Amino acid sequence: MKLTALVENTSNCELKGVHGLSLYVETAGHRLLFDLGPDRTLLENAAKRGIDLEQVDTVVLSHGHSDHGGALAAFLEVNRTARVYVQRRAFERHFSKSLGFVKFPIGLDRRLMDHPQVLLLDGDYRIDGELLLFTVADTAKFHSPANDTLYDETGPDRFAHEQNLLLFGERNVLLMGCGHCGVVNILERARPYRPAICVGGYHLSVPVTKRSVPEEILGGIAGELRRYDVEFYTCHCTGEETYRYLSARLPNMHYLSCGKSIQA
């Protein structure tokens, strides 16, 4: 398996960095995109790396926020065959509340939920022997205050629209988007599958201020992650301050910026 970050907040190479996430994965049986980023940056960065998006056969959208699925329409313009796996509730309306008052829409384009390439899911789903999607219902451990500005149509978002991906191979790999349900809770749900690598954001940085969540939460998370024999690659919404804290305590914690690749 080879994984490349095609969209991520930061870039130290020729690719454009933008707030969002898209991971391109080549496996024995698939050419896959996990999330698509917010805009046409995905298409531009893929072209720079010589990645033909027409050859992608599978897309997974981790949840219903535009920084992860805003490029869906643009992708569907260039790829007419890939199946797009997304939780049905991801197409509900989602909002970010700024300064406690104004709600800004941050959802997906709802016109695309009936697109013939889009497969709407209701919970866990086995795509094939190589790919398994799963959701997390128990989100009790280490709630991130960075989630508290996010809402759906009924009130504070509980992230029932979020899903994660397990890739099975010589070393199993876990992909998460923002990890709104909590990296600790997600890892506990994935534990029976023994992932050796975990890639994704943890949503531990407040988007507006870019400040990390309180240290007592970070310390608890670091203690839990230390129990796993896993290589962690974090990115996007974890935040640079949070990454510095975690990587100082976890030698197996790395940052995956735009353009970087992982071999597994």
Image (cartoon, grey):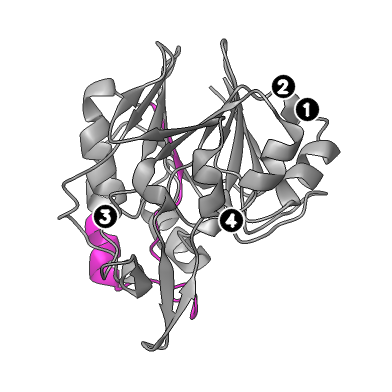
The magenta stretch is 196-221
Q: Which mark is residue 20?
A: 4
The residue lying at 45 percent from left, 51 percent from top is 201
Residue 142: name its quadrant.
bottom left
- Marks 4 and 3, how far apart at CA: 23 Å
- First in sequence: mark 1 vs mark 3: 1
- Marks 1 and 3, how far apart at CA: 38 Å
- First in sequence: mark 4 vs mark 3: 4
Residue 121: name its quadrant.
top left
The residue lying at 61 percent from left, 61 percent from top is 19
* Residue under numbered circle 2: 55
- Marks 2 and 4, how far apart at CA: 22 Å
For disc 2, the neighbor class at 10 Å (few under 14, some 14 to 19, many from 20) is: some
Q: Quadrant of the N terminus?
A: top right
Residue 74: name its quadrant.
top right
- First in sequence: mark 3 vs mark 2: 2
* Residue under numbered circle 3: 221
Q: Residue 42: where, in percent of width, then height?
A: 71, 45
The residue lying at 29 percent from left, 23 percent from top is 194
For disc 1, the neighbor class at 10 Å (few under 14, some 14 to 19, many from 20) is: few
Q: Residue 13: where, in percent of width, then height?
A: 78, 49
* Residue under numbered circle 1: 52
Q: Judge by depth and name the residue closer to the eye, 218 or 96.
A: 96
- First in sequence: mark 1 vs mark 4: 4
Q: Judge by depth and name the residue closer to the eye, 128 or 237.
A: 128
Whether residue 121 is situated above or below residue 9 in the rendered picture: above
